[in-house]
Image (spheres, rainbow, N blue to C red):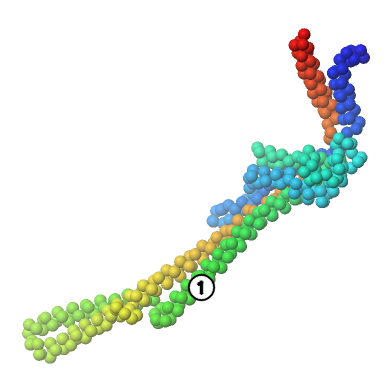
Amino acid sequence: MNALRRQPLWALILLSILGAAMYWSLIASDRYLSRAHVVLLSAQIAKSEGGLAAIVAGQTNNDLLVLRDYMLSTDMLAILDAELGLRAHYADPHIDRLSRLSAAGVPMEDFHRYMLKQISVELDEYAQVLRISAQAFDAETAQRMVEGLLKAGEEHMNAMGHRLAEEQVRFIERQVEAVQQRMVEDKERLLNYQNEYGLVSPPETVASISTVIAGLEGELASLQARKVALSQSQSARAPDMQRVESEIKGVREQVARERARLARTSGDALNRLSAEYDLLTLQAEFSNQLYATALTALENTRVETARSLKQVSVLQTPTFPEYSNRPKRLHNTIVFALLAALTGLILQLLIAIIRDHND
């Protein structure tokens, strides 16, 4: 006793250790810890043999980190408080003063800071597993807290994915409608053009007329050769010569008419109609291709929406603690005693150094 009086520092430290031991042993309220281990899976679209799509499970650390951040957010805390009445639970006056929430009506910032000591969400990057735990002052509340974390977390991840997927689908659907309208208009324009000029395919008509002209020119060449041959034995007034001249003249006029149909400086020349028809055809074909591409993009986007669905797959269901495992009374007492003793040694050393300097 006299030794303690001569060493008030150690007396104070001893009293603090005794007080801590008394608190952890007799006063500290029992807390119950519930745990769950989960992974976050999403559908991944993969190509299998034969070009068929297969759905496989996949996950990324980014998804797990997003889920972890949401589980520790004030939004999640508000949901749990509304469902379980956490403020009233943690502010219960039967809980020891050091462990309980100071008041049920504390600001959200203080409540959130307090609850971060009761809820733990840790990511095991190696196993890609989210380890969730929650402490409460009765076993049922602890288990329901973990269940609420899992349920609200999965709903939030799905809501995020659905919003983005729905926006993408709606955007592409509007694009498909616009492209479809454009395709219909281009085809209608092409049909009106065909009906206006009475030609199903001007390029084919041009090719046909070119074939006719080629045939006429061949016939004209034959008649001219015949005329040369006849001129060697007959006069220009001979009936055969007259007939050949007449035939040559008729063929030339026919060639001129056919050429006029193909090209003229004004009017509905076939070469101009063919060029316009080709342009309208290209526009219609481009619209068809654009529409097909838009439909493919729409279907791909709809398939991709499956990937936005997140499933919280539970490896270990939220446990129902059968006994209180918090606080760790003996562990806390020993740790406090060691820290107090170390603090006492440091303070005693500082005091000794100060005294030596004073002397």
Residue at the extreme top: 359
Residue pictured at 36% horizontal, 74% vertical:
274
Q: Residue at x 7, y 85 (%)?
A: 233
Q: Residue at x 16, y 89 (%)?
A: 243
Classify mark 1: residues with Cα within 10 Å, few (<14), some (14-19) or many (20+).
Answer: some
Of 119 and 297, nearer the camera is 119
Picture mark count? 1
Residue nearer the viewer, 155 or 317:
155
Q: Is residue 117 above or below residue 340?
A: below
Q: Determine whether the residue tagged by mark 1 lies in a helix, strand or loop.
A: helix
* Quadrant in which the C terminus is drawn: top right
Taking the image as shown, residue 150 lies to the left or right of residue 127, namely right
Q: Is residue 27 above or below residue 161?
A: above
Please name the amino acid that badge 1 sits on.
Val
Residue 338 visible in image: no
Residue 27: % across, % down: 90, 32
Quadrant in which residue 208 is drawn: bottom left
In the picture, the quarter occupied by the N terminus is top right
Residue 127 image position (x, y, % from top left): 67, 39
In the rendered image, which residue does mark 1 sit on? 184
Residue at point 47% right, 72% down? 186
Q: Could you say where residue 7 lies in the image, as x and y percent from the top left?
A: 86, 15
Residue ranking furthest to the front:
358
| Picture coordinates of residue 12, whole percent (x, y) | 87, 21
Can see residue 272? Answer: yes
Judge whether 172 appears above or below 8 on screen: below
Quadrant of residue 117 in the image? Answer: top right
* 158 lies left or right of 174: right
